[in-house]
Image (cartoon, rainbow, N blue to C red):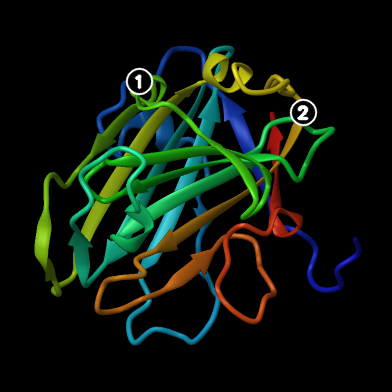
Amino acid sequence: MSHSGPAPSEYLVKSVEKPIPIDANWEKEVWQEVPAAEIALHMGENPAFSPTTQVKLRYDKQHIYGIFKVEDRYVRCVVEEINGPVSTDSCVEFFFAPDSRSPLEYFNLEINCSGVPLFHYVTAPRKTYEVVDAKKIEKIDIAHSLSGKIDPEIQEPLTWYIEFKLPLKLLKQYRNISTPAPGVRWKANFYKTGSKTSNPHYFTWNEVVNHRPDFHLPHYFGTLIFD
């Protein structure tokens, strides 16, 4: 399937020697050393307010690490159950295809601003997917700067953070993966949303060209290049 338009975004994922402590601290040294990807391209009608969202990734032999920084407003959070509809809240998302031979088969990790995750493994978007069991999802270490229900929403400017540590062996329970190492490439995209806030929005890292907002279009993923 060929798509005209700009070349896919690329993000260089640098390795790390020691495990990263997961505490949602954007300022710690291990993150200062790497550039951020900007989640700044919008799908659908532009919202009244556009959050500024950045993400960074690193990896070691056992894990993928990620951290999001969101300079937001209209922050809402009501979903409290794992695998609930967290994208309706103020939410960040990491979709990734970890097998370079199957770039359209992917996992979607969605985390609302209070740290509640949804994690699915998708083989056919909108048709065939597996909901990762909540007990397995608990093996993903997630730190969050906000907590609990936020309702009514916070309309004033508010910066919030999500940090995660995702075990590679969890992915291997579902499919073969191209184990991160120098030169390995995964297809991926990052998103920021909040579809049931008073300021609905659908931001992407790599451009998605579609008549309506839809994050489940893996042929529009960008590229992660492991360093």
Q: From the viewer's perspective, is residue 170 above or below residue 35?
A: above
Residue 215 at x, y percent in the picture: 57, 61
Amino acid type, mark 2: Val
Residue at left offset 26%, top offset 33%: 143
Choose between 34 and 167: the one closer to the eye: 167
The N terminus sits in image quarter: bottom right
In the figure, is residue 31 to the left or right of 149?
right
> How far apart in space, not on screen, are marks 1 and 2 (Cα)?
29 Å
The disc label shown at residue 135, or none: 1
In the figure, is residue 126 to the left or right of 9?
left
Q: Of tags 1 and 2, which is closer to the observer? A: 1
Name the element at disc 2. Answer: loop
In the figure, is residue 37 to the left or right of 5?
left
Choose between 25 and 113: the one closer to the eye: 113
Identify the residue position indicated by label 2 in the image. 184
**Label 2, residues with CA under 10 Å away: few <14, some 14-19, many ≥20:** some
Q: From the viewer's perspective, is residue 115 above or below residue 158?
A: above
Contact flag, marks 1 and 2 (Cβ < 8 Å):
no
